[in-house]
Each structure stands twice: as structure tokens, then as C-alpha cells.
Image (cartoon, grey):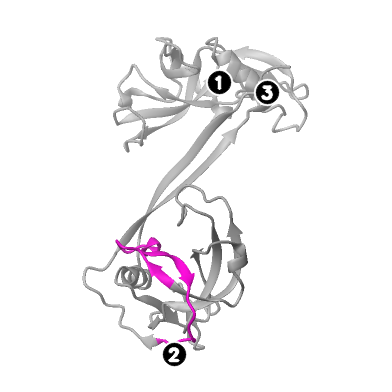
Amino acid sequence: MPEVLSAPLVVEFPFTRSLGPVQSAFLTGLRERTVLGVRTADGRTLVPPVEYDPVTAEELRDLVEVAATGTVTTWAWNPSPRRGQPLERPFAWVLVRLDGADTALLHALDAPGPDAVRTGMRVRVRWAKERQGAITDIACFEPYESEEAGRPAPHTGEFTDPVTGIVAPARLDYTYSPGRAQAGYIEALADCRTVGERCPACRKVYVPPRGACPTCGVATDERVEVGPAGTVTTYCIVNIKAKNLDIEVPYVYAHIALDGADLALHGRIGGIPYDQVRMGLRVEPVWSEGGRHPDHYRPTGEPDADYDTYKELI
């Protein structure tokens, strides 16, 4: 039985966003141990606050302060916390309707076990020791026996040094297994070769192969070696340095139609100033020592390809 290939992969993107007046007040309030909601035209108090009424779409600005105590409306036990979650030990995910609010806030509840959690239990906010104006300023909720607090109180939303923007990292960790078609593609790359698969119906060669023709929907199994040279069909100039990528900006990433392929793949262009890269440029792969894929593509010195030979691959 052939070896089943797999590899851990991480997709990560630090999303930076500016904050409007409502979200700015909410997050700044958390830094100051104050929970703010927003009141709608029909008198409901929404926590977390939103900037527009979910029913009427009207802009909302009427901020109110609610209590740091509340009631669990529903919950689920998390026996195996993951990286970046609020607690490192098992905990419950809970929806908590804070006293004075009409909607529930999702967060973690620190409890010794699932038997200690129930819908309707009373809880309170446990504030983080160091707060910076983020939802993590609420470290978690904890059980707290108390009566329900009073009505929400109006709040101006004004604080010293308000939070005006946040960075929200999005990350996905997963294990990828390529399957038969892509496993053959990867194994060929280890020998400095590029292989695709030909569709038995339309006869197009797809690189990388997927095991089926995306046009005809039929299985593919005829392997075809393509390249090594190819043609730049289109490209972009990268001016922002990527995390963990030791390449000086600006540099060029291009779609490259390898000779014999009917689908362009992408690769970095090197060996030429970035402002001299162009559509139709003929390029060849440069393999790094011990690498399992081309490090970059460089010009072959051939004349540029005629546009009609690659226009269908743009």
C-alpha cells in the first residue's frame, strides 16, 4: 500500500479594522470594567451592541450601561480547550443575558465540570487583570448567587483615550491529505518534475491535478509531464512583506501556464527586476537544493509568447 501523504497546515490572517462610535465605546468600556449595550427604537437593549437596528436597519447610538451579572440561557461543555481559547482547562461555552439586556453574550464559564452548569444559573463577569479594550478583557464568567440587578442606565459612551481600532487574528489549523492525484503531483515535484492529468473527454491537461476534470466532471488518471518552461499569463506586484516569508519587497507573483498544461499555476518570478515582468514572458523553474517545489521562476531568454497562445488561460 502506498504511503498516505499528510501535512499540518495553518491559514492565518490578522484582520485589522477601525471601530465606529458604538463598538469603540463598547470595547473601551470593557477596559474600564463597564459593559455597554445599545437601545433600539422599540426599547430593547442589545449586548453586545450593534451599530444598526437588526429589524429596522436604523443607526443606533443610544448607549446604556448594563450589569456585570447575568443569567445563563444555554450552554455547551468544552472538554478539550484549543489554543487561544479563554481558559486552558475544560470550561463551558455559555450564552449569558446580562441583567438589563435583552440579548445574550457568548463567552466562557469557569466551572469544575458539566454537572456544575445549568440553564438559568446566575453568573458574573471575571475581569482580566490587564485590560486593553478587547472582548478578552472579560476573562470569563464565574458562578455567582445573586438577585437580578436593576434596569440599564444611560451612558454617554465617552471615555479617556478611546479604543479606535482592533486587530482580530483569524487562524485555522488543519491536517491536509492530498489524495491520489495530488500525491502523484507532489512526488513528481520531489524529482524536479511537474505532472498533471489529462481529461479523457475534453483532453485538457490540468496542473495541479484534482483527480477529476473541473469542466467535464469525469475522473482523470492519465498522467502527463508538462513544462518545465512556461509563459506568464498575468501577474501582480507584492508590496507588503508577508509574515515568516523571507523575501524582500517588492516582488512578483504570477500565473504561469507551463508548456503542455491547460491551467495556469502560480509562482514567484525572480532573476529580473520586478518592473520588467510582463504578460507573455517565457520562464523556467529554479529548484532550491532539497526543495520539493520550485523556489521561483526566471526568464528563459526566449522571445515573449504570442498573446493568442495563452489568452484562454488568463
Q: Nearer the viewer, residue 45 or 78?
A: 78
Q: Amino acid at mark 1?
A: Thr
How crowded pointer 1 is (Cα within 10 Å; few <14, some 14-19, many 20+) is rated as few
In the drawing, what numbered circle is on residue 181? 3
Residue of label 2: 150
Q: Nearer the viewer, residue 139 or 114?
A: 114
x, y percent for residue 22: 37, 73
Q: Nearer the viewer, residue 130 or 143?
A: 143
Q: Which callout, 3 or 2, points at the residue further toward the start of the chain?
A: 2
In the image, what residue occupies the spot 31% across and 27% down?
275
Q: Which residues are magenta?
A: 125-152
In this orientation, does residue 272 appear? yes
In the image, what residue occupies the spot 55% across and 62% down?
92
Q: Amino acid at mark 3?
A: Ala
Q: CA distance from mark 1 to mark 3?
A: 27 Å
As helix, strand or loop, the secondary structure at mark 3 comes to helix
x, y percent for residue 7: 56, 29
Q: Which callout, 2 or 1, points at the residue further toward the start of the chain?
A: 2
Q: Nearer the viewer, residue 192 or 259?
A: 192
In this orientation, does residue 194 appear? no
Q: Which callout, 1 or 3, points at the residue further toward the start of the chain?
A: 3
Residue of label 1: 309
As helix, strand or loop, the secondary structure at mark 1 comes to helix
Magenta-drawn stretch contains 77: no
In the image, what residue occupies the spot 60% across and 60% down?
77
Q: Which is closer to the viewer, label 3 or label 2?
A: 2
Q: Which is closer to the viewer, label 1 or label 3?
A: 3
Q: Amino acid at mark 2?
A: Gly
How many numbered discs, if any?
Answer: 3
